[in-house]
Amino acid sequence: MPSVNLDDWVRPGPTAKQRRTDVWIGLAVAAVAVANLFLSRNISTVRVDDGASVAEQIAWVLAITLPLTLRRAYPDVVAVIIGAAFIGGQVRGSLEQQVTTGALFAAIYALGAWGRNRERARVLRLVIIGAMFAWIVFVFVFFAGQFGGHADKASLAFNWFVVNSAFFAFGYLMGDAAWQHVRRSHALEEQAAELRATQEIAAERAVLGERVRIARELHDVVAHHVSVMGIQASACRRALDKDPARARTALTAIEEGARTAVDELRRMLGALRATSAAATEAVVPNAGVERLEEITDRAREAGLTVRYAVYGDPVPLPESLSQAVYRIVQEAVTNTLKHAHARVLDVRVRYLSGELELDVTDDGRGGSPSAGGMGLVGMRERVAVHDGTLENGPHPDGGYRVRARFPYPAGVTL
């Protein structure tokens, strides 16, 4: 799964709902700040006549608080405006301090949490914080005479710098933490989407693989029976007048083959309509290496001279491998019946040291179905699944040969 590149990620802007929320919050903060200004004027120990006029102080309060209506849409501009207005209000002696200080904190936080250009957001916050400390130093130096003796000045200086350091550091770090949280959430969402897409592709491939497997089974089973039926029908036609008994035998074989083919078709159609687990059970019939003689018997009934032999000591095989052996022999015999015009069929199963070998040879004309035929494709797929090898082509002595080798799975010993 490809990883999400977080270095290039840019946080999306606020939604329409978030913008509306910011407008209402900004207006509410501005109203509270103006109300607090009048309260400060009433309870202040400083003469109100020494500061700016009421109208100017209201203007400074609004300049500091109203930009919060755009704090997430334009965090860079809002932080600069609020920072500059805050110092301006301090210079002009605005009496409102509590709410406007909170607005300054919100602006620094919003710039850290919503700034799309991270380098610019970092620099602007540091500049604003530096300007605030410069203003504190200026006030302390040029108005030191108003702060009492040396002990009072030292305590006040310590208090100012410690409290303001904690204040600005908290706003800075909280903004970064919020941005990091959203970035990680975005990465998790991207990974979840990729995982869902991968799962959908895997599910589609599984369905396709199941359909291909059913199609392969359908071809191997039904085509074999239909081919045998065709051979038997031809024999019946030739023997109908000269040898009625042989014709009846052929018709009986055709009847049995037709019944078996219909049963296989019903089983396959049922598998297509069933769940995957039921389909798997339906597609895997009770066919294995122990039933190879049934295939050769049907070929013999179709008029071929069949030699079937097993060499070596048979060993128990896994069900999937046993079924693959059965299907490959079945397909090879079907091709002989359909294409080879053969008279003799030789089927040999060899249990060798370390591998199982199948050898199906006929004395036909040496022809074969096209290389792209479903039968040969199915044989190659079955062999590949079990890490085996497949050879097919004209035999040096004439006819056609199919030879497959399968290594024994782990745990199988002679």
Image (tube, rainbow, N blue to C red):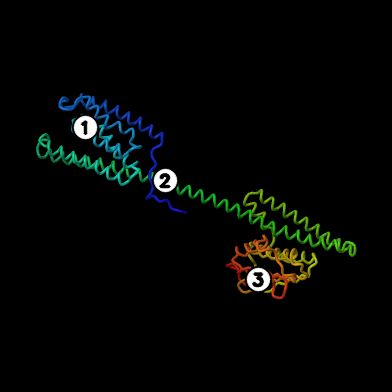
| Amino acid at circle 3 | Glu
Residue denoted by label 2: 186
- In the rendered view, does 305 fall on the left or right side of 410? right
> Farthest residue in the bottom direction?
397
Q: Is residue 341 left or right of residue 285?
A: right
Instruction: Work out whether residue 93 can be spotted.
Output: yes
Residue 156, image quadrant: top left
The residue that mark 3 highlights is: 357
Label 3 and label 1: CA atoms lie apart by 95 Å
Of pointers 3 and 1, the one earlier in the residue sequence = 1
Q: With respect to residue 261, does 359 lie above or below?
A: below
The mark nearer the N terminus, 3 or 2, is 2
Residue 388, picture quadrant = bottom right
Checking the image for residue 89, the label placed there is 1
Circle 1 crowding by C-alpha within 10 Å: few under 14, some 14–19, many from 20: many
> How far apart are the two marked residues, 2 and 1, measured between alpha carbons?
40 Å
Please tell me how crowded label 3 is: few (under 14), some (14-19), or many (20+) other residues with Cα within 10 Å: some
